[in-house]
Image (cartoon, rainbow, N blue to C red):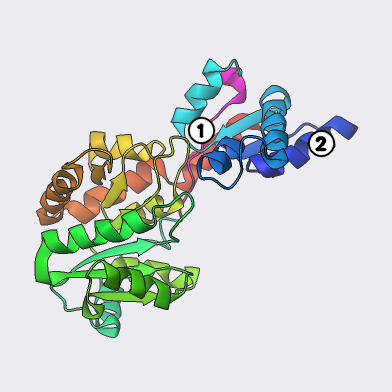
Amino acid sequence: MARGAPAGSLAYLVWQRIGIPFYVESFEPHAEYMRQVGVWSRFDPRYLFQQYWENRQKRHAQALLPVAENYRQQLLREGVSPKRVITVPCSVNLVDFAFDPKERGQTRARLGFAPDALVGVYAGKFGGIYYDDEAFVLFRKTADFFGPSFRLLVLSPQPAAEILLKLAAVGIEPAQVKVVFAPFSEVPRYLSAADFGFGLHRPTPYVSPIKVGEYWANGLPVLLTAGVGDDSAIIEREGGGAVFNLEQPGSVPIALLTLQALLEASDCRANTYQLAVRYRSIERAREAYAALF
């Protein structure tokens, strides 16, 4: 059992040598992602080898478990048997990431956020498959839209000084933001202190961002890029956030209006949590493995 297409390449090589059947969970077009974000070029040996090995996995793996239904459909179009492909989105522990009203108050007090502040949280890195400079412009537009009560919470392993410098460059005052490097175990308490989450993936159709599942599990609607895995379509169809497209003028203000309307509903947090139950529960993975084995 391999997790991800790079690991699947090694599993394929083992199968080639000794014939042990292999499965690839979280299978994705890794070579194309690395090329699209500029890490590899089309003629980079790493790209060429990874592309070759992914094609071998499609042909010889006992089963492939992509994280997005979008990619399952693409694999079927490429001729992979439907019996060998099961979608398993990235799972989230719904208990660990559940909203905690007590932690909300305590964490806000520790951060210096007022009880009535509107807090947007971003958990993750900047650059690569995520927006970088565009993210900070989006933060500024969000701050302008929601006004003086808006506060930004950034949970990132990147240096806080660099992030604060970029925020200052777009006019976000230090009093409006907190940048924290939080251990994974502490992330749920920070999410409980927030009101919505930022999803800043560049448009990538075959992913299942774990942070979206974590936001939803905590009841946070997500301001998400269009064209991200299955999640953008789920939000457009069922709520749980708002979708924006930086290529379309006026898209961000419309998305912020949608988000504002969601946040004003008393059942916003409970309804959003149900998306995590339907789409990100570990039960989805259990069902897939039961079907395979």
Q: Which residues are magenta?
A: 81-92
What secondary structure is the magenta-colored segment mainly? loop
Question: Residue at coordinates 40% horizontally, 48% vertically from top-left?
Answer: 201
- According to the image, label 1 marks what residue? 87
Q: What residue type is disc 1 on?
A: Thr
Residue 42 in percent (x, y) is at 62, 35
Residue 240 in percent (x, y) is at 25, 46
Kind of element beneath mark 1: loop
- According to the image, label 2 marks what residue? 13
The answer to whether any part of residue 202 appears in the image is yes
Kind of element beneath mark 2: helix
Q: Residues within 10 Å of mark 1 (few under 14, many from 20)?
A: many
- Above or below 265: residue 144: below
- Above or below 5: residue 112: below
Q: What residue type is disc 2 on?
A: Leu
Could you say which disc has been placed on residue 40 in the image? none
Q: Quadrant of residue 17?
A: top right
The answer to whether any part of residue 1 appears in the image is no
Q: Nearer the viewer, mark 1 or mark 2?
A: 2
Residue 69 in percent (x, y) is at 45, 30
Query: Is 254 included in the stretch rendered in magenta?
Result: no
Q: Is residue 188 left or right of residue 32?
A: left
Q: Quadrant of residue 155?
A: bottom left
Query: Front-most of 136 and 290?
Result: 136
Question: Residue at coordinates 22% horizontally, 80% vertically from top-left?
Answer: 175
As measured in the structure, the alpha-carbon distance from the residue carrying label 1 to the one carrying label 2 is: 24 Å
Quarter the C terminus occupies = top right
Query: Earlier along the polypeptide chain: callout 1 or callout 2?
Result: 2
Query: Front-most of 290 and 188?
Result: 188
Quarter the N terminus occupies = top right
Q: Residues within 10 Å of mark 2 (few under 14, many from 20)?
A: some
